[in-house]
Structure formats: C-alpha cells, structure tokens
Amino acid sequence: MDAAARRELRIALVGATGVVGGQLAELLAERNFPTSELKLFASERGAAETVAIGDEDRLVTELTGPADLAGFDLAFLAVSPAVAADIIRARPGPILIDLSAAGRTASEILLAAPGFVERDRIAALASGEVVAIPHPSAYALATILKALGGDPGFVAATLMLGASTGGKDEIDKLMEESADLLNARLEVEDDEQQRAFNIYPADDEAEIADAVASQVGALLGARPRLTMRVVRVPIFYGTALSIAIPGNQSETWTALLREAPGVLLIEEEMPPSVIDSAGQEAVVVNLKRASDGAALWCVIDNARLAALCALWVAENLSPAENRA
C-alpha cells in the first residue's frame, strides 16, 4: 500500500470471538488504532455475537469465505490453522497478519515480532502479502536468548501450555471436566486424556517443539541446539517455560536480562506464577544461577503476547505519526 492508503486502514478481524481475537479487539481500542473501517468476523457459531471495542459493542459477521475480505487493507487471522491456510491460499487482497500455525514455518512468509524485524521491512509490505506472528513461546524463548547473547549453546526446556493455547473450546472443556470431577461425575473415553487436574505430554508435542525451534532459529538467524518437552497443564490461561542452560557463562545474565527490552526480570525470592503474567506485555523471567549453569523460569500471557506482536506489525503499516 502507498503512503496515502495507509493513513487510516480498513481492517478485518477474523476470529473476533476467540481468545486472541478478543485481545486484539481490546488492544485496537486501547491504542486508538487509526481505522476508516473495522469489521469483525467469526465462524457461523460466533456470528451474531457482539464484541466490545472500547465503549461500543460491535456485531460479529459470519465469514463465509476468503472473498469476504476483499476490499480491506489489512486482515488479522486469529483463527484455526485450517481456516487461515484457506485464506492465505486465496490471497483475497489485504495484507494478512496470520496468528495461527499456518505459514509460520514457510520460508517465503515473513515471521515478524518486535525486536527481530526492522520497521522498514514491515512498512514495505504490499497488498496481498502475508506476515506470520510467531508462537508466543518461540517469541519468549527467542527474546530471552537474544538478551543473553543469541547463542548460549545447548538449551533444554519444558513448555507448559494452558487451555487458552487451544482457544475457547479447550477452556470450556477444562472447565466442564473440572466441575464434573469435583462432583464425582467425570467420564473420560479410553482414547482421551483427562484434562482436569492432570498434566500430560501434548498429543502434538513433536510438531509444537519443532515449530518453536524453527521459529526461534528464524528470529535469531540460527537454530539453537534445543531439546524441548511440551506438556498440557490444567490451567485456563497462560503459558510457562522452564529453561536450563548448562555452562559457566551465566555471571552477567542477571544484568543482561534486567536491561533487555521486552523482558521483565523478577528478582524476589518468590518466582512469578502464571497468574502473575496475566495482562503483562513482557516476557516475565526469574533466573537461578548455579556453578554449572542456570535455570530460568518464564511465564507469559500467550494470548496477549500474540495480539501485541500482531498489533505491532499493524502499527508499522500506519503513517509514522501513528507509530508507537
């Protein structure tokens, strides 16, 4: 888009009734994002609901297909990978900011997040192009490794995913199972995992671990030597990362993390909990150093971080005077 077309954007928010879509709607209002039009879309199930944009309740329209997005300058895709992939293949016209897993590992699609891509690269995007938002855990891990110098060597991590990483359906299922279990009426099929009061390896563990490692590599410019386990934990919102880095290079890490943009270092004796990350716009970290390495505890509001990264991209498509 040329400079004149970027003065006020015609925006479509696809997936407005979801967890990340709701965060985007909230942030668009909080930051007074300049729009000439903002239209909210969802699946048939979410259509006819309303979403608050500032003090106004906006009606959500059913997305019947990619063609519904023609005529917009920008479309946020806060939807499932399958729906996002269909829209990306169709390229209906607007710049597409993809917050799903679709396209995140495709080398031809720009992976963008604050601190890892120059603003000029975002401003150069043309109509019909796609920019992908990294997995919030990949963004958190890359932010930490960048603060520590980019390549600390071998990294071992356990990624703990709350229900919000699976969207509203997973939150509802965890809530229902928790209530059923407490009332002694929970029944789980033989081929299903119990979600409530349970921790277990994710069914798609290998896929998530590979995607996170690939995205961290793309953001940093080199894929780290990373071993990761991915587990589901019975919390409704948020994500936690336990990171171990061996070696004796950690003497300066406290100072590096304290000064790093996008990082909130907690140095008190009590490390932060996942609840403490709710609403945070930073990667919240606690560091424990030892003679043979360091252990880091990291908590993030995954939906908030994904929405913030997407909005950062959108802000850099606006005129210079509207940029943060």
Image (cartoon, rainbow, N blue to C red):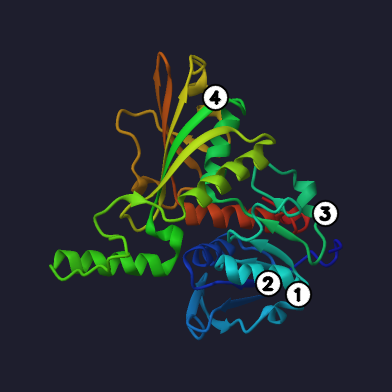
Q: Who is closer to the viewer here, 287 or 234?
A: 234
Residue farthest to the front? Answer: 190
Q: Who is closer to the viewer here, 66 or 206?
A: 206
How many angstroms separate mark 1 from mark 2 (CA)?
A: 7 Å
Which amino acid type corresponds to the residue marked 4 in the rendered image?
Answer: Leu
Which amino acid type corresponds to the residue marked 3 in the rendered image?
Answer: Ala
Q: Who is closer to the viewer here, 252 or 25?
A: 252
Q: What element carries label 1?
A: loop
Q: Which of marks 3 and 1 is nearer the N terminus?
A: 1
Q: Where is residue 115 in the image (x, y as percent from the top left)?
A: 65, 40
Q: Position of residue 76 (x, y in %)?
A: 64, 66
Q: Name the residue under label 1.
A: 92
Q: Residue 87 carries which label?
A: 2
Q: Position of residue 113 (x, y in %)?
A: 64, 47
Q: Earlier in the sequence, mark 4 or mark 2?
A: 2
| Front tag of 4 and 2 | 2
Q: Mark 4 points at which residue?
A: 256
Which amino acid type corresponds to the residue marked 1 in the rendered image?
Answer: Pro
Q: Where is residue 53 in the image (x, y as percent from the top left)?
A: 53, 71
Q: How many labels does the image show?
A: 4
Q: Residue 187 carries which label?
A: none
Q: Name the residue under label 3.
A: 124
Q: Which residue is drawn at 67% across and 42% down?
A: 218
Q: Which of marks 4 and 1 is nearer the N terminus?
A: 1
How many angstroms separate mark 4 from mark 1 (CA)?
A: 44 Å
Q: Which of marks 4 and 3 is nearer the N terminus?
A: 3
| Front tag of 2 and 3 | 2
| Front tag of 3 and 1 | 1
How many angstroms separate mark 4 from mark 3 (CA)?
A: 32 Å
User: Do callouts 1 and 2 mark residues in contact (Cβ within 8 Å)?
Assistant: yes
